[in-house]
Amino acid sequence: MTELSKNGAAVDESAAAQRPEAFLEVRDLKVHFPTDDGLVKSVDGVSFSLEKGKTLAIVGESGSGKSVTSLAVMGLHRLGPRGKNVRMSGEIWLDGKELVSASPDEVRKLRGREMAMIFQDPLSAMHPYYKVGDQIVEAYRVHHDVSKKVARARAIEMLDRVGIPEPAKRVDGYPHEFSGGMRQRAMIAMALVNNPELLIADEPTTALDVTVQAQILDLIRDLQKEFGSAVIMITHDLGVVAEIADEVLVMYGGRCVERGPAGEVFEQPQHPYTWGLLGSMPRIDRETSERLIPVKGQPPSLINVPSGCAFHPRCPYADIPKGNVTRTVRPELEQVSTGHWSACHLPTEDRQRIWTEEIAPKL
Amino acid sequence: MSETKKTDEAAIPQQTSASEGSADREVLLRVEGLTKHFPIKKGILQRQVGAVKAVDGIDFEVRKGETLGVVGESGCGKSTMGRVITRLQDPTGGKITFEGQDITRLSTGQMRPLRRDIQMIFQDPYGSLNPRHTIGSIVSAPFRLQGVEPEGGVKKEVQRLLSLVGLSPEHYNRYPHEFSGGQRQRIGIARALALKPKLVVADEPVSALDVSIQAQVVNLMDDLQQELGLTYVIIAHDLSVVRHVSDRIAVMYLGKIVELADRTSLYEAPMHPYTKALMSAVPVPDPKRRGQKNERILLRGDVPSPIAPPSGCRFHTRCWKATEICRTTEPQLIELRPGQRVACHHPENFADQAPQDTVLLSAAKEASELVPDAVVADAPAETKPAAAGDEPAAEEKPAGDKEPAAEEKPAAKDTASEQAEGSEATASEQAEGSEATASGDASKTAVPETAASKTPAAEPAEAAEPAEDAASAEAVAEAADTAPAPEAAEAAAAAETAGEKTGPGAKSTPGKATGKAAKKTPGKPATGTGSEESSGK
Ligand SMILES: Nc1ncnc2c1ncn2[C@@H]1O[C@H](COP(=O)(O)OP(=O)(O)OP(=O)(O)O)[C@@H](O)[C@H]1O
Ligand SMILES: Nc1ncnc2c1ncn2[C@@H]1O[C@H](COP(=O)(O)OP(=O)(O)OP(=O)(O)O)[C@@H](O)[C@H]1O
Ligand code: SF4
Ligand code: SF4
Ligand SMILES: [Mg+2]
Ligand SMILES: [Mg+2]
């Protein structure tokens, strides 16, 4: 917390001059958690921007910092049990306001209305002993001066839109009486109830079957069309990414390793981790191979993050770049084509050769 | 793993009843006529006014060493089925046989020795981990509770398990809230696999994992199956994962199994229209094909309620092939082709089972508008030409005459039951709700109404705090699940220990609160795990 204000003050000085054009801009965001075993560098220098009406998909390894990044944008690390124990720096600009240095109260006012989040764990976002409907009603009434009755009608409408059968009846159920997917949809209803301008959806469809999933994606698209909302979609479901994303950001070990237009990242991925990720996917439109091929090795420690490129202990190409750079120098994001960035020391020729000869044929 | 000589013997006679063609392996688990209804109670008198028929009469068997995949729409009863076959919840009816032993009515105490062999990976990793316990103690709990001392000691074994699922020693002393979603899911997997159980029911085990770690976990489960002959029932939405891991797949719809077939048949020649619709909707990870939905079968209409399921075939309100017989007569799950059981009067990819019944219900006609032409054309010749071409007059008439009535009936029933059930939370629901608070601030329970206005929704992260407390109620249940407590006292005791180890998120006196609440409020915790019986009655 002290860090925060220190940092915030520093930011304020130059802030006016640096005010970005984009609706959302995140600059060099760091979120670290001190623990008994050491400082966990969950997010370690992530930057991206997002325009209204667009969708950014964040993909990446489990534990790579996707949720922590989005909770930071929502200003949620400072609250609850985590709040006491987090170190945050960098800048988060939402619609011209800087949030890292803003007071919790200012951020709270934005939350729900201007920005809303679909949480990865429905149970962590829903109160177990209040009726699902009441929770949506409250979320709505915080930002809308309407009667309970009106808000209730709105809650039922939202439950209906996310495909809960018999919403008028289910509105009075408790979270534990919902199935996993129903809980997830109830939370989606809660996040969308105020038509937020920025929607962060953290794995919004993991518990949903494909039909409902399609319905939810349509709903999000509607929101974008109608209100020009910007959407951050965190998902490991690359089918969903292909379906909805304009841009893709790939995270590994608390950092962004690749970023670019969705089509390009799928067709011309540039980073060895992205290659590994695409290569380990079971696909329904392909033959069932006998065994899936995970990226070899273990996820990196976020306390003792591997030196240089965090991916080097697992990267089959770590020895190609000359000298010992992969192990000593942290690769910065570099533009490989318009709007397409990758953080890797591999020389362009090698990268292209490996992609066309070794990787692409196997995908 | 050298136990259960008795049960092994008992399994032998069981085999004789295996009737299906491809049953070359011994049956490990047999489920017959299984039902699970959640009563809907109303008023101070707690009169039962209806029931959520979450699982409504299913039959299947799981053979030793195989993987049975279970798929189906959200809310169709998959998790409930999983919790009932692992006996974390009591079935309402039917029979469950594990290794030849009837376990349908075993008490929690009687189930205890079997807990080692039957494990469940929960769909909601957050709810199933005790927030006050470190990961090290959560994953070593099965060893403690079953009194198993692995070679090299518990800690070493736990660290080995953690590394198998891609977690590291630096995670050992951390608490659940300090993990990512996928990491929590893997903790649940490590815990379930710790004692190398015979049967693992895995509810969405890899849904929160990126594809690489997903592959690692899938391979791990595969290896254990190869080495130790583990048997899995895997519930999942991701059809490409299901296809990859399953030997056979059961498709559920509204509390019933509508198709049960080996993997290849199901993916290549699904017979039930619902299966076909399900398969058609899988997004393909390729942006070039974005928006290319012409092959997708959109299901029309609402998902029907499990409280008042449609008559006859439950899918008839949304099926594009539905005829009168579908509305009146429930199709039985029968083996149409070796290894492929289907419950449908007019299956796809197979001879019509009711060729005399050719007139489509009007809902079906509307439904077929959303079905790609290719699929409609695929429909068995008997159904379509007859309905559309041959006898135009005949077609029109029954449609006009019968339809309204047909349509009205289920609808009317629905509203009736809607009224009857009312919508207030019943006392039992309240009790259940408050059970969840058990370890939390007990006073909050007393005033749900006022507290509710304190908007948990608006401040999710703050809400996360009580939610964590609530989770520990489940965690208590979870502790009880690994070693189910036969007595309420024991559950409370378990709760107390759960409370003692105060984690970072812990509140004032969780231990006491838990104990008290557990005694006061009967009812089931959300996961309906072990403590259900002990505290319930
Ligand atoms: N409060 C905390 N204290 C310590 N470490 C934490 C804390 N919260 C998160 N972490 C760690 O930070 C890393 C990033 O977590 P995050 O939840 O952002 O992962 P994620 O990318 O969302 O993964 P997943 O796909 O599994 O949800 C993880 O390795 C996690 O263990
Ligand atoms: N404790 C309960 N009380 C009342 N109804 C319940 C309870 N548990 C489950 N249900 C209802 O039973 C039905 C089946 O729920 P279940 O959790 O088994 O679905 P599911 O197939 O696992 O769905 P999902 O894919 O969304 O997880 C749902 O309608 C649900 O609301
Ligand atoms: S920088 Fe080196 S180690 Fe890192 S991804 Fe590129 S080649 Fe691999
Ligand atoms: S054809 Fe009839 S029996 Fe078959 S799924 Fe459709 S409605 Fe059910
Ligand atoms: Mg996450
Ligand atoms: Mg479920």
Image: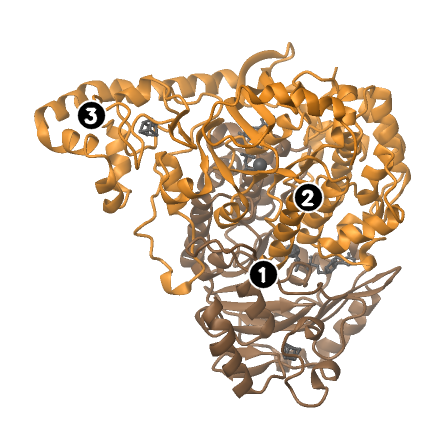
Q: Report the chain holding disc 2.
A: B
Q: Position of residue B537 (x, y in %)?
A: 75, 14
Label 3 or label 2, whichever comes before in sequence order: 2
Look at 35% across and 58% down and name the residue there: B291
Is residue B72 or residue A69 the one in the foreground?
Answer: B72
Q: Are marks 1 and 2 in contact (CB under 8 Å)?
A: no
Looking at the image, residue B63 sits to the left or right of residue B189; the answer is: left
Location of residue B362 by image quarter: top left
Q: Position of residue B488 (x, y in %)?
A: 82, 20
Residue pointed to by mark 1:
A293
Is residue A40 or residue B44 the one in the foreground?
Answer: A40
Residue pointed to by mark 2:
B125
Q: Are marks 1 and 2 on the same chain?
A: no
Q: Chain B is which colour?
A: orange
Q: Nearer the viewer, mark 3 or mark 1?
A: 1
Is residue A227 or residue A335 the one in the foreground?
Answer: A335
Mark 2 belongs to which amino acid? Answer: Pro
Q: Classify mark 1: helix, strand or loop.
A: loop
Residue B128 visible here: yes
